[in-house]
Image (cartoon, rainbow, N blue to C red):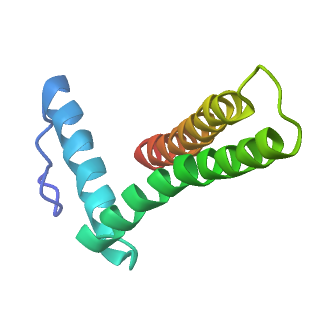
Amino acid sequence: MSDSKPRRRRLPQDGDKMLREVEAKEARKLKARSRKDGGVWFGLGMFGLIGWSVAVPTLIGVALGIWIDRTWPSRFSWTLMLLILGVMLGSWNAWRWVSQEGRKIEQEKEE
């Protein structure tokens, strides 16, 4: 009464968990390799994008503040106030973008 199929040996629970983790890491690695947007240059580009997302609102705030200070002089410095507002707005924008990218990465890990 022998089966023609070889019997598969059952791994312990810890082995099953490790096997699933290795399979998931392998799938993530293959998915990352299939993407064309990875690499050092992509990372540097993203770093620059985050920098510009802070710099542009800051420079717009400074330019608008200088224009307001020259056009309507007052005892308050609109340049300083709009500089601070621009930095805050740019930082919020960068934080929002980074957290969205982080959520995408977490979703990919779960898949």
**Residue at far top of view:** 75
Residue 23 left/right relative to 6 = right
Residue 57 left/right relative to 94 = right
In percent of width and height, residue 77 lies at 71, 27
In percent of width and height, residue 41 lies at 29, 73
Q: Is residue 44 visible?
A: yes
In percent of width and height, residue 94 lies at 55, 43
Q: Report the front residue among 27 and 39.
A: 39
Q: Report the front residue among 53 and 5.
A: 53
**Residue at far right of view:** 72
Q: Residue placed at 35% from the left, 69% from the top?
A: 42
Q: Is residue 12 visible?
A: no
- In the image, residue 3 sits, relative to residue 14, either above or below, namely below
Q: Residue placed at 79% from the left, 45% from the top?
A: 70
In percent of width and height, residue 92 lies at 61, 34
Residue 23 left/right relative to 88 = left
Q: Report the front residue among 96 and 20.
A: 96
Q: Residue placed at 47% from the left, 52% from the top?
A: 50
Q: Quadrant of residue 38?
A: bottom left
Q: Report the front residue among 16 and 79.
A: 79
Residue 90 left/right relative to 37 = right
Report the label total: 0
Q: Residue placed at 61% from the left, 29% from the top?
A: 84
